[in-house]
Image: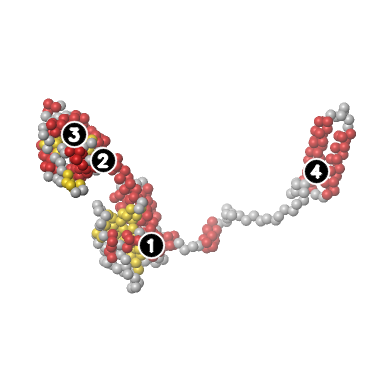
């Protein structure tokens, strides 16, 4: 656009304003004059833009500012370009050595199966079986052992073993492994004569490389995964094996911690916090279940109700804490005097209850007498004194006394009261007339 066109447009607009000014208000009111000036300017502007558009289609703006020259650089390749060519060029320009991809030694299928077991929180044996299948594929030519605690924290026992070589004993102590002390993966290169291996449990095959990794999570130590290989596979390094081992142990450690947390939650929901035996809610659920099964299969059930006779005396002389110590000790002792299938519970306050599935009157009475005799001779250390008690015991059986859970408990409590009233330190049997 040249400046002459703009000057002509300005003159035309000013003439329109002058015409509107000199027209008398009797002919054209003031507000109509303003409307006329607005329409006049708009019409001239539209005419000017139309003229400029015809002269230069790429310029419809009223000012002739030069546009910067740009070039479109596509971020992604064009569709018509062969994909293989593009892929090769990108890979060649940005190629970074990746042993997982280059040597294809990561067992994707086996690892995914193991991870599915972990994510679905499958039982321990299922998850460990998946891990046992995965480890030989993940660590080629290696031999290994997974150690975990079994019942006590002073000894680690073999859970799984893989590989053709024996690299360690079936049981070791945590002190034999350096990874236990430092809480990190320990790599030993046995070809380095100046290096003193920190893991003394690897005395069976001290050659090549060894790797020991602690199984830890939630500030708990669960075990050790140890590996030994005479020579690392081609294209792999000790650092890469350490990386893979850290992935395995971190995943397994979190799984075990989650399993332990679930187990502790279940234990707390069914266990009495003081004595460690089952609580009353679990007792009632178990007894209803056992009664239903006994009615269906026509089998007997025995119930033993237990009360420590010296509770009130100990309470008056030593206080509540001494009574709690006594109850805790009974909770630890009673399960040792009954069968595996029997269910020891804390009924309420100082009363214990034992459910004996499949036990008739003879078995139930014999078990009650054994418990009474064992506890009668028990002395419990409490500070610088010894606590002791005798037991009053009441028993009831199904079908002799009752055919319902509530009836069995009621008859058992009645028999227990009879034992207390009869002089304590005795076993009382609920007679059939109590039904």
Compare marks 1 and 4 and give the one earlier in the sequence. 4
- For disc 1, the marked residue is 241
Locate residue 27: give its quadrant.
top right
Q: Compared to 433, does 338 lie above or below?
A: below
* Label of residue 272 in the image: 2
The residue that appears at 32% across and 70% down in the rendered structure is 196
Compare marks 1 and 3 and give the one earlier in the sequence. 1
Colour mapping used in the image: secondary structure
Compare marks 3 and 4 and give the one earlier in the sequence. 4
Neighbours of disc 3 within 10 Å: few (<14), some (14-19), many (20+) = some
Compare marks 2 and 4 and give the one earlier in the sequence. 4
* Label of residue 48 in the image: 4
Compare marks 2 and 1 and give the one earlier in the sequence. 1
* Label of residue 9 in the image: none
Regarding mark 1 in the picture, which secondary structure is present there? helix
- For disc 3, the marked residue is 294
Give how far across and how far down residue 353 sits, in percent. Answer: 19, 37
Neighbours of disc 4 within 10 Å: few (<14), some (14-19), many (20+) = some
Q: 97 left or right of 9?
A: left
Marks 2/1: CA–CA distance: 46 Å
Mark in front: 1 vs 4: 1
């Amino acid at each position: 656009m040249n400046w002459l066109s703009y000057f002509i447009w300005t003159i035309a607009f000013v003439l329109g304003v002058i015409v509107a000014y000199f027209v008398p208000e009797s002919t054209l009111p003031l507000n109509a004059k303003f409307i006329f000036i607005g329409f006049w300017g708009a019409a001239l502007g539209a005419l000017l833009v139309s003229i400029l558009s015809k002269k230069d289609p790429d310029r419809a703006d009223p000012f002739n500012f030069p546009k910067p020259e740009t070039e479109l650089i596509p971020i992604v390749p064009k569709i018509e370009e062969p994909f293989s060519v593009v892929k090769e060029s990108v890979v060649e320009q940005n190629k970074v050595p990746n042993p997982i991809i280059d040597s294809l030694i990561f067992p994707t299928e086996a690892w995914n199966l193991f991870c599915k077991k972990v994510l679905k929180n499958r039982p321990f044996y299922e998850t460990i079986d998946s891990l046992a299948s995965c480890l030989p594929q993940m660590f080629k030519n290696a031999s290994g052992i997974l150690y975990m605690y079994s019942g006590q924290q002073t000894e680690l026992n073999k859970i799984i073993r893989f590989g053709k070589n024996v690299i360690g004993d079936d049981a070791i102590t945590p002190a034999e492994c350096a990874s236990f002390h430092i809480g990190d993966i320990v790599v030993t290169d046995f070809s380095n004569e100046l290096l003193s291996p920190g893991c003394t449990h690897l005395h069976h095959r001290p050659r090549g490389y060894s790797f020991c990794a602690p199984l830890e999570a939630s500030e708990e130590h669960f075990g050790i995964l140890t590996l030994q290989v005479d020579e690392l596979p081609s294209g792999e390094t000790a650092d890469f094996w350490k990386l893979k081992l850290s992935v395995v142990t971190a995943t397994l450690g979190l799984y075990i911690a989650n399993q332990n947390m679930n187990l502790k939650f279940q234990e707390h929901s069914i266990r009495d916090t003081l004595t460690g035996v089952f609580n009353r809610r679990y007792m009632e659920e178990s007894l209803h279940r056992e009664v239903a099964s006994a009615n269906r299969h026509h089998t007997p059930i025995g119930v033993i109700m237990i009360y420590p006779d010296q509770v009130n005396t100990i309470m008056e002389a030593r206080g509540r804490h001494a009574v709690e110590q006594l109850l805790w000790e009974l909770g630890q002792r009673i399960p040792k005097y009954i069968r595996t299938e029997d269910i020891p519970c804390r009924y309420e306050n100082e009363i214990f209850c034992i459910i004996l599935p499949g036990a008739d009157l003879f078995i139930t009475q014999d078990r009650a007498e054994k418990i009474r005799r064992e506890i009668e001779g028990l002395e419990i250390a409490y500070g610088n004194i010894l606590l002791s008690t005798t037991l009053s015991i009441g028993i009831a059986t199904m079908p002799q006394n009752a055919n319902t859970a509530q009836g069995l408990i009621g008859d058992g409590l009645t028999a227990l009261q009879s034992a207390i009233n009869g002089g304590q330190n005795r076993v009382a049997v609920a007679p059939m007339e109590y039904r």
